[in-house]
Image (cartoon, rainbow, N blue to C red):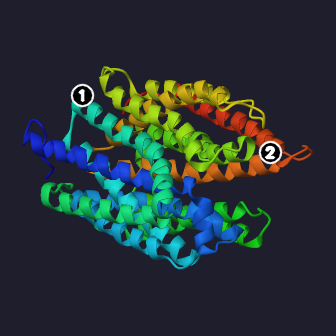
Amino acid sequence: MTTLATPAAGTAGGARGALALPAAATLLALMNYTAPLAMLTDTAAGLGSGPTAQIWLMSSISLGLAAALLAVGSLADDHGRKRVFVFGAALLAVSSAACAVAPGSAVFVAGRIVQGAASAALIAAGLGLVGATFTGPRRAHATGIWGAMVGLGIALGPIAAAGLGILGGWRLWYWATVAGSALLAAVAARTLRESRAARRRGLDVPGVLTMSLGVAALLAAVTLGRLGWSRPEVAGLLVLAAVLLGAFVLVEARRREPMLDLGLLRRPRFLLSVTGALVTGLGIIGLMSFVPTVLYVTLGMGPLAAAFLLAIWSGLSFVAAAQARRLPARLPAGRLLAAALALNAAGQLALLGFAPDEHWWRMVPGLILAGIGSGLGNAMLARLAVESVPPERASMGSGANNTARYIGASLGVALVGAIVTGTGGGHASPAQAYAHGANVAILVCSAIALLGAVFAALVPDRG
């Protein structure tokens, strides 16, 4: 396999670049992913968006991410991880410019979908570069750093977007993303060394199309379902998603060189990687994405204040993931993932008791526990993503892991939204109804995280 220089077989500077650039790209991608949390109202007003369009303003990037991750991961392994990484950074710059100048919701949503696909290229190819460069204890250290960027990006995105919004309006964030991604593309093109599998496989066109379109149909159905699950277009999209994803499984089972080797699901570590990522999206990201809105409605907090409070969770996630590299490499990643999910569940349960007259500081202990759990989980998922597949398929492993995470996140946001807005009937005020719904959502998401912890503890951590 032609690969990047490793610490043992190449320059230390090359290895540092193969970690620093993917880490920076993941930080930028996650900041951009969470930025609208802090400025949805201003963005919607500036674009003249109605209720339906506002849902797409938030959800469109998830569609692009989840639909593209597995495909671009496979392409990176076969055709060059550096090539896909640089292309992703350039595409993020172009799509961010489209968002910055968007005259209305349609152009903005299209730009966010393309941003998602560009971010997918950065995330999958970037983690693939890390997996191809580092081995043994150095890999545990490197994937811990990469996982830390997920938490840091979630923490900084809403704060940076809100701050730039105060200085120059909501469009300023997207111009900043143009500058950051263009710089990333230029540096990566000059400093990264190419890395790919030793034997290039043909492009799995049927697999790419059925997987990408199936995931897109599923997430479109989930997004529209937030406006009413009985709508005929929702049922139609769900049927289309089932047909396409079923076709994907049949295509991959019959191909000699599939994009996703279904036999990997018999590997306990790969199963842990995908399932753990799905649970993280469904039971953790889904809930935490709604926390700023709940704080605004029930406690009357402003966007910037809510972003700083949520940063207790996401900031500690960064710290915990960065420190996970100090854990002995002999500790099984699956058991550590089980502990991380259990910590998340405990932290979320500590948030119970939302009420209009509550003080914000009562949430701090729960956010601390959940933040530590999220950071440890992010580090272990990154480690499992590259250790659970053959070295030449590192980007595909990253793509599969992150596809599950963002599908889970989209489903989780829809689930939490339905619970929060649909279970508070009979209360005296909208704030009380919203608080009741938030407490129900906390119970449901905590149960999902606990079930994930039990599953991770029971699956053998081998292979």
> Residue 111, image x and y in percent?
47, 71
Residue 94 in view (yes/no): yes
Tally of marks: 2
| Mark number displayed over residue 431 | 2
Residue 79 in view (yes/no): no
Residue 426 occupies which quadrant of the picture? top right
Camera-side mark, 1 or 2: 2
In contact (CB < 8 Å): disc 1 and disc 2: no
Residue 342, compared with residue 132, is above or below; it is above
395, 319: nearer the viewer = 319
Residue 47 occupies which quadrant of the picture? bottom right
Which comes before the other along the chain, label 1 or label 2?
Answer: 1
| Mark number displayed over residue 6 | none
How crowded is the residue under tag 2: few (<14 C-alpha within 10 Å), some, or many (20+)?
many
Could you say whether the residue bearing mark 2 is in a helix, strand or loop? Answer: helix
> Residue 248, image x and y in percent?
50, 63
Q: CA distance from mark 1 to mark 2?
A: 50 Å
Residue at 63% across, 28% down: 361
Residue 110, compared with residue 276, is above or below; it is below
Residue at 27% across, 56% down: 77
59, 160: nearer the viewer = 160
- Three-letter residue code for mark 2: Ala
Residue at 50% across, 38% down: 311
Residue 237, compared with residue 78, is above or below; it is below
Could you say whether the residue bearing mark 1 is in a helix, strand or loop? Answer: helix
Q: Residue furthest bottom?
A: 103
- Three-letter residue code for mark 1: Pro
The residue labelled by disc 1 is 137
